[in-house]
Amino acid sequence: MKNISPEEVLNMIDEGKEINIIDVRQPEEVAAGKISIAQNIPLGLLEFRMNELDKNLEYIMVCHAGVRSAQATMFLEDQGYKVVNMDGGMLAWDGPIE
């Protein structure tokens, strides 16, 4: 499983790179604040909504502390997706949130 630091993700956003972030937390957790460009697909729904993702793109998976996003990363890797887990989740995120 590939990992990326929150600092690397923030640098990519600041540089204007086109990245895809999937936040696998529950909607009530996301309502408290999320990375602005992140799309919310709760971990429990990922299996049913993965068809919304493009296998040609890379996705950065995010959750609260990095555990659920690691599960999501391993699951999607097994399905043939290009995914990276953000270390530490939103607890480690120092960038802006919405």
Image (cartoon, rainbow, N blue to C red):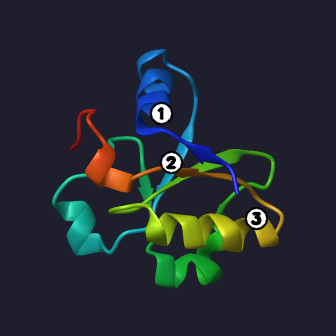
Q: Position of residue 41 (x, y in %)?
A: 47, 68
* Residue position for label 2: 21
Residue appearing at x 50%, y 48% in the figure: 21
Above or below 45: residue 90:
above
Asked which secondary structure carries label 2, the reply is: strand
Q: Position of residue 46 (x, y in %)?
A: 57, 76
Q: Earlier in the sequence, mark 3 or mark 1?
A: 1
**Mark 2 is on which residue type?**
Ile
Say whether marks 3 and 2 touch (CB < 8 Å): no
Q: Which of 73 and 54 lies nearest the eye of the viewer?
A: 73
* Residue position for label 1: 9
Gap between marks 2 and 1 measured at Cα: 9 Å
**Mark 3 is on which residue type?**
Glu
Q: Position of residue 93 (x, y in %)?
A: 31, 42
Q: In the visual, does 18 lie left or right of 95?
A: right
Gap between marks 3 and 1 measured at Cα: 19 Å
